[in-house]
Structures are given as C-alpha cells and as structure tokens.
Amino acid sequence: NRDMIPVLLEALEEQIGNLENTGTITEQLQTTEYTKSIVKELGRLKATEAASLIWEIVESVNEPFLLGEAIISLGKVGAKQYTNELNILLRNLNFNLGDIQDQRKNEILAFSLVTALERLKQPESYSPLFFASTGWYSSRSSVREKAAEAMLNILDDPIEQLMDVLIESKEYDIKLAALTAGFKSKASDENKASLAVL
C-alpha cells in the first residue's frame, strides 16, 4: 500500500537517529532489523522519495546486511543520482581497496551493488560490473555470475568500453575476458569484429 510511504519515511528518519545511539547488543540488533525491514519495504514500494534517507544509511552504517539491503533498495527506488557513488564503491571492492580482513562482508556488499546497478541500468556502470565479473570473489558469493548477467542487461553494445579495457589492461586474462564479453553482448557483428581486430 503506497499510502504507507509517508509513515515508513517518518519511521526510517527516526531509526537513522537510533542507529547512532549505542545501547545493549540486543537493542542494537533490534534497531538494525527494524531499520532493514523499513528499507526493504520502501524499496518494494519503489518509493523514490526515500532515496536520500536510504543513502544516509549507506553512508552511516557498517553492518553488512543492513548496508546491503539499503544499496539494493536504492536500485529498486531508481535512485540514479547515486550511480556514480555506487560505481566507486564497487570499483574499490573489485580491487580489494576496502577492509581486506573481512572478505565475506565485502562479498555481501559487492553482490548488493551489482544488484542495484543492474536495476539502475546506467552505461557508466558497465566497467565496474565487468571487473566484478572477473574479480577475486569466491564462487559461493555468486558476485561474478551476477555481474556477468548484469552487464548484458545494462548495455546492448559495450564494445567501446571493452576496447578501453583491452587497451588499458596489461593482464592477458582480463583482455580475454573483455573479448568474451564482447562476443556475448548484443553488439553488431561488425562491432564485435572491430573488438577482435583490436
């Protein structure tokens, strides 16, 4: 029921304030779970007006499941204004520039970012998605598979982006992955041939 959106927005605003308060472990867990439920529902309702509040959560929390839910909800509400920031977050994870100690958390966040970027369908997300599809992520995380699928859905003809990868990358495996991605895309045979020639 979309009539619930104003109530959920008010509740989320209140919860953002509560997230900063340090209570007992049980209280913190309850606050996190409650906030996650609100964010998930706002995403399900495609509440575009919730984007800035959801982004506040992305900027301020560290708990991976709440953070992941907030990122996915940004995709669901169509918050294209945050595409660049989401691209940077995924790029940093791809090159493992975050907290190397907590790989599981990084995989949860990467999967959420790939899911959100696929929904936002912005051409500039192709490059971070490509590098996620070839990244360090474990097979159990499904990040690489999800990213490869997302690449096909956000851009029909990624040949220009893939040519940049071929020129800039020194690693043979990456060059080969770029060529493979080009052949799997919906680009014209002529453009695929240009990629092969390069």
Image (cartoon, rainbow, N blue to C red):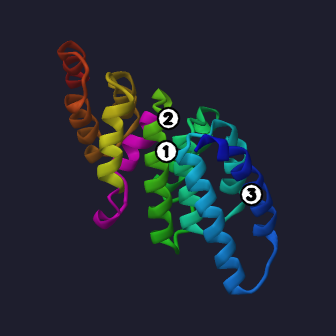
The range drawn in magenta is: 125-142
- Residue designated by label 2: 120
In the rendered image, is residue 43 in sight? yes
- For the C terminus, which image quadrant? top left
Q: Residue at x 32, y 23 (%)?
A: 156
Disc 3 residue type? Answer: Ala
Chain-order first, disc 3 or disc 1: 3
Mark 3 to mark 2: distance in Å? Answer: 26 Å
What mark, if any, has residue 183 been given in the picture?
A: none
Asked which secondary structure carries label 1, the reply is helix
User: In the picture, residue 168 is in which quadrant?
Assistant: top left
Disc 2 residue type? Answer: Leu
> Which residue is nearer to you in this view: 67 or 140?
67
At label 3, counting other C-alpha atoms closer than 10 Å, the crowd grade (few under 14, some 14-19, many 20 or more) is some
Mark 3 to mark 1: distance in Å? Answer: 23 Å
Q: Is residue 130 magenta?
A: yes
Q: Is residue 154 above or below residue 86?
A: above
Residue 139 spot, x, y in % from top left: 28, 63
> Which residue is nearer to you in this view: 132 or 55?
55
- Residue designated by label 1: 116
- For the N terminus, which image quadrant? top right
Q: Residue at x 34, y 30 (%)?
A: 162
> Which residue is nearer to you in this view: 164 or 146?
146
Q: Main secondary structure of the magenta part?
A: helix
- Residue designated by label 3: 11
Residue 6 spot, x, y in % from top left: 73, 45
Residue 102 spot, x, y in % from top left: 51, 73
In the rendered image, is residue 95 in sight? no
Contact (Cβ within 8 Å) of mark 1 with mark 2 = yes
